[in-house]
Image (tube, rainbow, N blue to C red):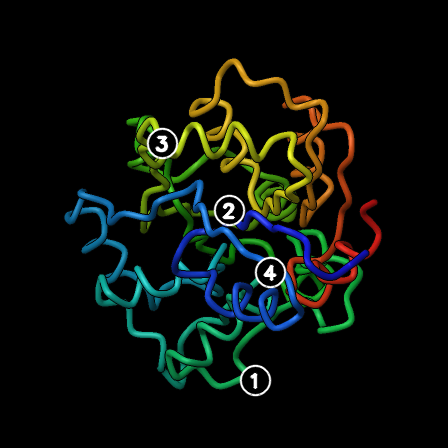
Amino acid sequence: MGHGRRVILTRPSSDSQAWVSGLQTAGHSVLHWPLIDIAPVPNSLSMADMVASAGSCHAIMFVSRNAVTHAVAAGLQLVNEHGPRYWATGPGTRQALLDAGVPAARIDAPPADAVQFDTEALWQQVQPSLQAKQVVWILRGADADNAESAMEGVGRDWLTQQLRQLGVTVNTWAVYQRVCPRWDTAQVSLATAAVSDGSVWVFTSSQAITHLKHLLPSVPWHNAKAIATHDRIAQAARQLGIAQVVVCKPAVGAVLSSLESLA
């Protein structure tokens, strides 16, 4: 029953093309409904400060492909023989760094056969080389409806805590904004029907699920089927009300295998 499913892909447009192609090639019908729109950060002065001081840090972590592209667009120079290490949690971000000209030897990321692509897996790779008083940057997205988030990036995550416990200074920069899309009446009607018609929703971000709850505030989700690319995202999907959630790696091959397991 793995072929011929209708799959609703919620990844941002900039990250989605390879997934759409892979799912369609495998015989699935794909509806691409991004639940996160990506926009530049309006605070150009902060971005200029970031670019000017890039050489002072030990490593720069990019939380996504979008973090790479927007940092480069802001003027961050990634090809520097004596510059920082570059961290990525997944293959998409790693590939974006390679596409930007960063040598593979300068990139730290979980191995291709890692059980999961996340900050915990990245930590296993970078922790042995860290020392107190080093500086690490985290370049990430901000939520457009949160003024503090738009200035500094979102919160303190697990990796930040681990770094600070080692005495590493962490600076977080928001290099793009995550914006909730706007749906018209027709889109809301289509999405409401897709909650219970056997379609499989693919979630790659907890923020996407937050936006979905905003877009469809009164829809019951108990009959929906979903694939989540991390346990934390699956937890958010279950909190939305989805009972049938399969967890897999954030890779199109893993999503295809998960589709086979969904009745």
Contact? badges 2 and 3 (CB < 8 Å): no
**Amino acid of disc 2:** Thr
Q: Between marks 2 and 3, how big is the CA–CA gap?
A: 17 Å
Q: Please name the residue that numbered disc 1 is placed on.
A: 105
Label of residue 186 in the image? 3
What kind of element bears circle 3?
Answer: helix
Is residue 167 visible in the rendered image? The answer is no
Contact? badges 4 and 2 (CB < 8 Å): no
Question: Residue 90 sits in which quadrant?
Answer: bottom right
Of pointers 4 and 2, the one earlier in the residue sequence: 2
Contact? badges 1 and 3 (CB < 8 Å): no
**Amino acid of disc 4:** Thr
Label 2 crowding class (10 Å Cα cut-off): few <14, some 14-19, many 20+?
Answer: many
Contact? badges 2 and 1 (CB < 8 Å): no
Tell me the residue at 60%/48% (across/down): 163
What kind of element bears circle 2?
Answer: loop
Give the quadrant of the C terminus: top right
Of pointers 4 and 1, the one earlier in the residue sequence: 4
What kind of element bears circle 1?
Answer: helix
Q: Is residue 39 left or right of residue 26?
A: left
Label of residue 89 in the image? 4
Tell me the residue at 73%/61% (across/down): 3
Quick one: 210 or 50, which is closer to the camera? 210
Residue 146, image x, y percentages:
33, 26
Q: Which-is-in-front pick, marks 1 and 3?
A: 3
Q: Is residue 86 left or right of residue 225?
A: left
Q: Is residue 106 left or right of residue 74?
A: right
